[in-house]
Image: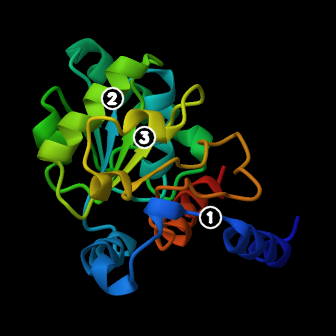
Amino acid sequence: MRMGSRAIFLDRWLSSQDFGLFSPPSLSSLSNITMTCSSAIQKTRPIAIIGAGVLGRRIGACWASTGYKVNIQDPDASQAAGALEYTKQELWRYNPAANADQISVHTFQDLKKAVEDAWLVIECVPERLELKIDVFAELEKVAPQDTILATNSSSYKSREMTVKVQPETARRMDIPPPPPPLPPRLPRLPLTHTHLQLIPIISFHPRSASSKS
C-alpha cells in the first residue's frame, strides 16, 4: 500500500470512528506536546526504554543507530548492563549513522531519573498486565507532562493499561511500530483514547530510525 493510499485509508477510518468520551481536544491543548516533538526532531531530549530485555534493547539500539539519545531503564543492573553491551556490539546490524563510541545510550535502575527529560517513553516490561498497569501509573507521577507514553505490548490493548491513570494521561499513550527488521504496521491505526495529533509524530520518528535497517 502506497503512502497516499495509507493516508486516504487512515482519513476514512478516522472519519468513521465514534470516539465518544475520548474525542480529541483542539490543537491548542496540545501545545506542550507540540513543543516536545519539535525539540525531539532536533534530538535534544532522550527516548526512555523501560525494560532491558530482548525487545527493549533492540528498540533502544534502533533509535540510537540514527543519533537519538536513549535511556534504558531496568531494576536489574545486569539486564541494563547487558542492553548497553548489546547496543555497542550489535549496532552494526542497524546500519548506524554513527560509530558505537559516538552514540548516546545510558542505563538506569531508577525510573524517575531515566524519564525525567524524555520526550518519548516506550514500555517494554514483561507481558504481565498488572505489571504494565503499575508501570504506567508510576510514569504518570514521574514523567514530564508533555512526554508521549507508549507500550510495546503485543498481548494487551493500551486501554487495558490505563485503569490507574487520569484520562489526560491516557490521551498521551500510543503503541509504537515494531523495531527492525520487522516492517511497520500498515496502516497505522490510532487507539481510541489517543490524541489523534500524536499519530503522525509517533509514526514518523520510528520510521526515520527503522528505515536504515
Quarter-of-image position of residue 117: bottom left
Q: Earlier in the sequence, mark 3 or mark 1?
A: 1
Across and down, in percent, residue 191 comes to 55, 53
**Most foreground residue, 44 or 90:** 44
Q: Residue at x 27, y 30 (%)?
A: 135
Quarter-of-image position of residue 190: bottom right
Crowding at dot 3, Cα within 10 Å, few <14 / some 14-19 / many 20+, comes out as many
Q: Which residue is mark 1?
A: 18
Q: Is residue 135 above or below residue 49?
A: above
Q: Which residue is mark 3?
A: 60
Q: Which residue is mark 2?
A: 133
Instruction: Locate residue 85 relative to residue 6 in the image: left or right.
Output: left
Q: Residue at x 21, y 16 (%)?
A: 77
Visible residue check, residue 213:
yes
Across and down, in percent, residue 204 comes to 56, 67
Q: Residue at x 29, y 50 (%)?
A: 104
Dot 1: element: loop
Dot 2: element: helix
Amino acid type, callout 3: Gly
For the residues marked 1 and 2, what is the alpha-carbon distance in whole angstroms? 25 Å
Crowding at dot 2, Cα within 10 Å, few <14 / some 14-19 / many 20+, comes out as some
Number of the label disc, if any, that sits on residue 150: none
Across and down, in percent, residue 4 comes to 81, 79
Instruction: Locate residue 1 relative to residue 210 in the image: left or right.
Output: right
Q: Is residue 19 above or below residue 48?
A: below
